[in-house]
Amino acid sequence: MLTVMSAGASADVVSDYLSAHSTPADDVLRDLAAETVQRFPDAAEMQVGHDEAALITMLVGLVGARNAVEVGVFTGYSGLCIARALQPGGRLLACDVSEEWTSVARRYWERAGVADRIDLRIGPALDTLRALPADPVIDFAFVDADKSEYPEYYAELVPRLRPGGLLVLDNVLMGGRVLDPDHDGDRAQAVRLLNDAVVADERVESVMLPVRDGVTLARRVG
């Protein structure tokens, strides 16, 4: 759900307007989005919107990323966008727990010609991240996975970002639940904790954007 809308405009109308005024999706992305809705209607909301995907693509390019990480693949839309925007020779480490969802991702990555740039790891993402070298070599990371583990993902990724590297965190507003103290579930509490930690973290400079369900950009400064 969009958190910013003009007076009298519904979220769907604003979403459609934003998508219509972003670089359009190509046939591969449109087909992937359609198949995701058809095959996984109860989970399709986990797929990033195309306007957010266009933002991710631009950010990867602006950072000049060669070494990227994605936590939470689902059916591969955002991963495809990241992989396309990598510098020549770049690689994306993609983490997910579902063979079923990522089997769709694999097909579309092949179709888009980016499968050779993506290293898909099936298993708990924290285990994968903790097994990475501690060297600060990650140029770009995107997190859109289990919200209760957001603080742990952040703790593993930030030290591994190179100076100038960018971490993008999705769903940081949790549909407004982070603003409501009556919502004290594990997921809302974890994201609320993370949001407070990011803004206080002297290792990064950050901005929270009202894109979709809230997106935080955290750039490593030292």
Image: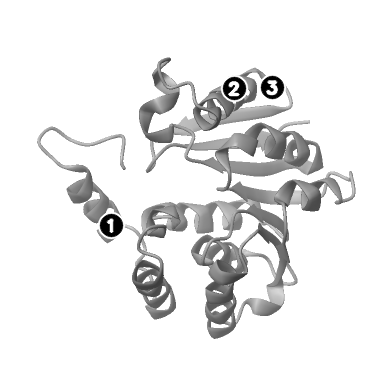
Q: Residue at x 64, y 21 (%)?
A: 197
The residue indicated by pointer 3 is: 201
Residue 7 versus residue 197 in the image, above or below: below
* Residue 68 shows in the view: yes
Residue lying at the far top in this picture: please name it. Answer: 181
Classify mark 2: residues with Cα within 10 Å, few (<14), some (14-19) or many (20+). some
For badge 1, the amino acid type reads His
Marks 2/3: CA distance? 12 Å
Q: Would you say 151 lies left or right of 14 here?
A: right
Q: Secondary structure at mark 3?
A: loop
Marks 2/1: CA distance? 34 Å
Sooner in the amino-acid sequence: mark 3 or mark 1: 1
Q: Would you say 133 lies left or right of 114 here?
A: right
Q: Quadrant of residue 37?
A: bottom left
For badge 2, the amino acid type reads Leu
Numbered disc in front, either 2 or 1 = 2
* Residue 84 shows in the view: no
- Where is residue 187 shown, x and y percent of the image? 53, 32
Q: Residue at x 75, y 46 (%)?
A: 126
Which residue is more in the foreground, 185 or 102?
185
Q: Would you say 205 lies left or right of 90 here?
A: left
- Where is residue 35 shown, x and y percent of the image? 39, 74
Q: Quadrant of residue 160?
A: top right
Classify mark 3: residues with Cα within 10 Å, few (<14), some (14-19) or many (20+). few
The residue indicated by pointer 2 is: 193
The residue indicated by pointer 1 is: 21
Marks 3/1: CA distance? 34 Å
For badge 3, the amino acid type reads Asp
Badge 2 vs badge 1, beta-carbon distance below 8 Å: no
How many marks can you see? 3
Q: Secondary structure at mark 2?
A: helix
